Amino acid sequence: MTKKYFIYKINLNILDFILIEVNFKLLLIKEESGGRSVEKNQEEKKEKRKYNVPAVDSAFRILSLLSRKKFSKSNLTEIAKALSLTPTTCYRILQKLEELSVVRYDQSSKRYSLGPYLVVLGERAKENILDLSVIKPYMEELTEETGLTSFLVNRIGKKKSTIISKVEAEQFGINVSVGRHFSIVDGSYGKCMLAYMDEAEAEELLHMNDGLRPLSEEEMDTLKSELKDVREKGYAIAFGEYIDGIVGIAAPIVNNTNKVDMSIVLVGLTTQLQGEEATRIGEKVKAIANDISFKLGGTVKN
């Protein structure tokens, strides 16, 4: 093609020829690079599709659903409807999960629940999570010293957090199960997460407004202004703001990448924590969170 083009334009002066030759080569380069871009985009799409396994995703969603108290014992129709799965697909996945003993099926009630092998997997996970082995003794110390229930809350994905460990007080314990999910903006632990994340991300999560209770614009503004105080003090307090009669005091735990994905929390009745006592315990929780952060290789925020 280049050779024919040269013969056809041989009668042009040398300057015209050079300009045409340069433009022609640039066009070829552009086309080649455009072709490579298209090929690259196609390859990227193939890579994304390669790792998208719908059956695995659906299986995990089923297990997550059954972990919730409301759906802990559910029939096929309830599960399929809650997850927008076809009954046939849902049934096939449940059959396989039952075969693996991660789901249990009760013949008499026709309902599914989490299976026994998950207990084994959970115990193995606990053994292999260094963070938990480091943090649990501190939680026990806090609960023994204050008489309050302590929780370890971990961020899950973008919008949620979950309780991954707790130590209940002997005389008074908050009845919340390990594995319970909350919106990341809820409670004192939510304030800790929001205070130490990117401001734009915090703003986005707040305006989703999907916490334990909807917040008014005024309450959102108050909460946003409070986040600066949380960073300065190193701990957060939620005094009956989300659940009447319940107070939570939380401090952020910084991991070895200097991010805050966990917080340690003390929870009790508002009658147990008033004024200076709440401040004293806040400082204690902060000191312990700083110790944990140091052991995990994180940079202490305060």
Image (cartoon, rainbow, N blue to C red):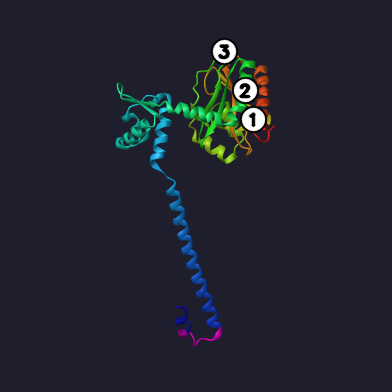
Q: Which residues are magenta?
A: 7-14
Q: Earlier in the sequence, mark 2 or mark 1?
A: 2
Q: Amino acid at mark 2?
A: Pro
Looking at this view, is 105 or 223 the one in front? 105
Structural distance between the alpha carbons of marks 3 and 2: 16 Å
Task: Determine whether the residue tagged by mark 2 lies in a helix, strand or loop.
Answer: helix
Task: Determine whether the residue tagged by mark 3 lies in a helix, strand or loop.
Answer: loop
Q: Amino acid at mark 1?
A: Val
- Residue receiving disc 3: 170
Which is the main secondary structure of the residues drawn in magenta? Answer: loop
- At 67% from the left and 29% from the top, the residue drawn is 290
Where, by quadrant of the figure, is residue 18 drawn?
bottom right
- At 50% from the left and 24% from the top, the residue drawn is 178
Q: Position of residue 94 (x, y in %)?
A: 35, 32
Circles 3 and 1: CB distance less than 8 Å? no
Structural distance between the alpha carbons of marks 3 and 1: 30 Å
Q: Position of residue 83 (x, y in %)?
A: 37, 34
- Residue receiving disc 1: 230
Instruction: Give the quarter of the figure containing the C terminus.
Output: top right
